[in-house]
Image (spheres, rainbow, N blue to C red):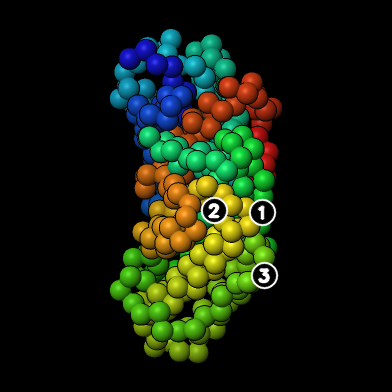
C-alpha cells in the first residue's frame, strides 16, 4: 500500500477509539475500547472514571491499530485527535497522547471538532454525500439540523433547546429500569411493543428547533401513574413520538432548503427504526439518503481521521487544547 493515512484518535466521552483512514475514507484498521462495564453501575458516564480508563487504554488501542495495519510510519500523513466538545478529562488524555505521539513520530497533530467527525462519518467506506446536504445529527450530546453546501461549510438550521435525542432515549431507559447505554435497549424493546400511548410530539410544527425534555417528563408521569404498564408499549410509544418529530422536521427542512440529500449521523442513527423512518422521509422528498455504516454511527476513530483530512486540505490547525464546548460550525 502506498496511500497516505491519518491516524484518528477519539476520547471525548466513554469510548477510546482509534483508526487509520485514507483520504478517500477507506478504513485500514480500527479499534474501540468501550467503558460500558465501568459506567453501568452509575447509570451514566462518570467523568473521572472515564479519564482513568482512557489513560489505561489509549496506548494499547493505538498499538493494536498500528499492528493490525502493519504500515510504515512514512505513510502516516498526520494524527487527528478530538479536541472537543466533550468531557475535559477524557479529552485531555486523547490530546496529550496525540501530542506525544506527534513529537515521537515527527508528524503534525490536528485537533478536530468531534461534531465535524460525525458529519463526515457518512462518507466513510465508499459512502457518497451529495451536496447541498441536509444533516440531522442525533447523538448523546447534540440534536440539530444543518445545511452543508460542501464538506467544510455548515450552517445550523435548528437545534434542541434542551435534551438531545440520545439523552431522551437514555433517560427513558433509566425510567424503565433498562441497562446502560439506554438507547440501544429502548430501540430493541420498542420493536416488541405497540405505540398505543399518546405521548406529546414537542414543537412538531414550530420551525426547525427541537425540545425533548417535555417528552421525557411525560413518560415519567405516565410510568408513575401506571406502574403496571407494559415497558415495551411505553418504549414503542416514546420511539413513535421521537420519530414523528424527527421525520416532520426533516421533511420541512428538505422542502425549505431543497437539499439533494438527507444525511443522518450520530449514535442514534445506529437505530434501525430511525434509519427506516428517515429512508421514508428522503424518498418522499426526492432526496438521497446517506447514512454512516452502522459501526461508524456511534463514536469512533475513523470519523475523526476522515475529518482530519479536511483540516489538512484546508491547512487548518486549531490550537491543540481540549475544549468542553464547540459549535458544529467551529473547526
Ligand atoms: O454519537 P454518540 O456515540 O456519542 C455522542 O457523541 O454523544 O451517541 C451516543 C448516543 C447515546 O445516547 C446512545 O444511547 C445512543 O447514541 N444510541 C442509540 C442507539 N445506539 C446508540 N439510540 C437509539 N438506538 C440505538 N441503536
Ligand atoms: Zn459523538
- Where is residue 42? Give x, y as percent: 48, 60
Image quadrant holding the N terminus, namely: top left
- Where is residue 205? Give x, y as percent: 63, 71
Residue highlighted by disc 2: 136
Q: Earlier in the sequence, mark 3 or mark 2?
A: 2
Q: What residue is rendered at 35% in x and 26% in y? A: 28
Residue highlighted by disc 3: 206
Q: Nearer the viewer, residue 43 or 289?
A: 289
Q: Earlier in the sequence, mark 1 or mark 3?
A: 1
Cα distance in 3D space between marks 1 and 3: 13 Å
- Residue 31 placement: quadrant: top left
Cα distance in 3D space between marks 1 and 2: 10 Å
- Where is residue 287? Give x, y as percent: 48, 52
Q: Nearer the viewer, residue 275 or 29?
A: 275
Circle 1 Cα neighbour tier, 10 Å, few/some/many (<14 / 14–19 / ≥20)? some
Residue highlighted by disc 1: 157
- Where is residue 197? Give x, y as percent: 45, 84
Observer able to see residue 3:
yes
Amino acid at each position: 500500500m502506498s496511500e497516505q493515512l491519518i491516524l484518528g484518535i477519539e476520547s471525548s466521552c466513554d469510548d477510546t477509539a482509534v483508526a487509520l483512514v485514507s483520504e478517500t475514507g477507506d478504513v485500514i484498521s480500527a479499534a474501540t475500547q468501550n467503558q460500558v462495564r465501568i459506567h453501568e453501575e452509575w447509570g451514566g458516564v462518570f467523568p473521572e472514571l472515564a479519564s482513568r480508563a482512557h489513560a489505561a487504554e489509549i496506548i494499547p488501542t493505538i498499538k493494536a491499530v498500528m499492528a493490525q495495519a502493519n504500515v510504515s510510519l512514512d505513510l502516516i500523513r498526520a494524527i487527528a485527535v478530538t479536541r472537543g466538545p466533550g468531557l475535559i478529562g477524557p479529552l485531555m488524555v486523547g490530546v496529550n497522547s496525540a501530542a506525544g505521539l506527534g513529537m515521537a513520530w515527527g508528524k503534525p497533530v490536528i485537533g478536530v471538532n468531534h461534531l465535524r467527525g460525525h458529519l463526515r462519518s457518512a462518507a466513510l467506506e465508499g459512502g457518497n454525500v451529495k451536496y447541498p446536504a441536509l444533516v440531522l445529527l442525533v447523538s448523546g450530546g447534540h440534536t440539530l439540523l444543518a445545511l452543508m453546501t460542501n464538506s467544510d461549510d455548515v450552517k445550523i438550521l435548528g437545534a434542541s433547546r434542551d435534551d438531545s435525542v440520545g439523552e431522551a432515549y437514555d433517560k427513558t431507559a433509566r425510567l424503565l429500569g433498562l441497562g446502560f447505554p439506554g438507547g440501544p435497549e429502548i430501540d430493541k424493546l420498542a420493536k416488541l411493543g405497540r405505540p398505543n400511548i399518546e405521548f406529546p410530539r414537542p414543537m412538531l410544527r414550530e420551525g426547525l428547533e427541537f425540545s425533548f425534555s417535555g417528552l421525557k417528563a411525560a413518560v415519567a408521569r405516565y410510568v408513575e401513574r401506571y406502574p403496571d404498564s407494559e415497558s415495551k408499549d411505553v418504549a414503542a410509544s416514546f420511539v413513535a413520538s421521537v420519530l414523528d418529530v424527527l421525520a416532520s422536521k426533516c421533511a420541512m427542512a428538505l422542502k425549505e432548503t431543497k437539499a439533494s440529500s438527507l444525511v443522518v449521523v450520530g449514535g442514534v442513527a445506529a437505530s434501525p427504526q430511525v434509519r427506516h423512518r428517515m429512508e421514508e422521509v428522503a424518498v418522499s422528498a426526492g432526496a438521497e439518503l446517506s447514512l454512516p455504516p452502522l459501526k461508524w454511527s456511534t463514536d469512533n476513530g475513523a470519523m475523526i481521521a476522515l475529518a482530519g483530512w479536511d483540516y489538512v486540505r484546508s491547512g487548518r490547525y486549531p490550537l491543540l487544547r481540549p475544549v468542553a464546548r464547540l459549535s458544529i460550525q467551529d473547526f
